[in-house]
Image (cartoon, helix red, strand yellow):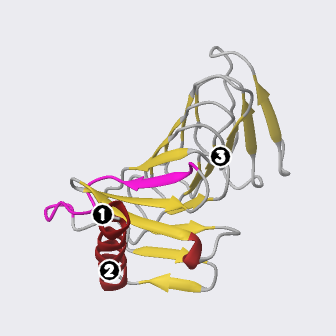
Amino acid sequence: MGAGNDTYLIDSTLDTVIEKANQGIDLVRSSVSFTLSENIENLELIGEQHISGNGNSLNNQLSGNQGHNRLMGYAGNDTLQGRQGNDVLLGGQGNDTYLFTRGDGIDVIMEEQGNDTLRFTEINHDQLWFSRDENDLVIGVIGTQDNVIIDGWYNAQLDRKVENIVAGNKQLSYAQVDNLVSAMSNLQYLLQDK
């Protein structure tokens, strides 16, 4: 807990980390469920266990492990990536960014407030398949089992919540997403009708 950029390794739920304010950018690497205390910026879950990670009021970077994780950002402009496994990602308040790449499994995004972004890394927009499942938007990576589900995208009361979808150098508007969902639904119907 010095003045530099510190890294803490956590392997017990009884472990605590104490940092003073303005003493660098600190990282907790944890093999158990963990909630960041004050003045700790980043959390990386490690191992294969199905565990959860929670941020704080800072701008946190939260990343999952190889298991099924639940990541919660709370306040701040947070960046969340579930990585391998099927994860639930909740940015909370603030302008949050969700990262997704090949091999990240099936992730569910549940967003509340702010101007939020889903960013596909090393995946172009023409490698994505868009569909609707009741009130949810499902974005699949073609040729894989990987999917991102944006919970409540079609719920008018939630106002979509994830405002920006970016893949490669392309940012998709609401209208473009809706057009892709419609076109791909029609194409799937035609293919099934053959």
Q: Quadrant of the C terminus?
A: bottom left
Q: Which residues are magenta?
A: 145-158
Q: Secondary structure at mark 3?
A: loop
Name the outermost residue toward the front: 194
**Residue at numbered disc 3:** 83
Kindly indicate the quadrant of the structure image that contains residue 69.
top right
Q: Mark 1 to mark 3: distance in Å?
A: 36 Å
Residue 61 placement (x, y as % from top left): 63, 53
The amino acid sitting under disc 1 is: Asp
The amino acid sitting under disc 3 is: Arg
Q: Is 44 situated left or right of 116 in this image?
A: right
Relative to the observer, which residue lies in front, 187 or 3? 187
**Residue at numbered disc 2:** 174
The amino acid sitting under disc 2 is: Tyr
Say if 191 sits above or below 15 in the image: below
User: Which is in the foreground here, disc 1 or disc 3?
Assistant: 1
Residue 39 placement (x, y as % from top left): 63, 46
- In the rendered structure, find residue 193 and report the number of the disc placed on it: 1
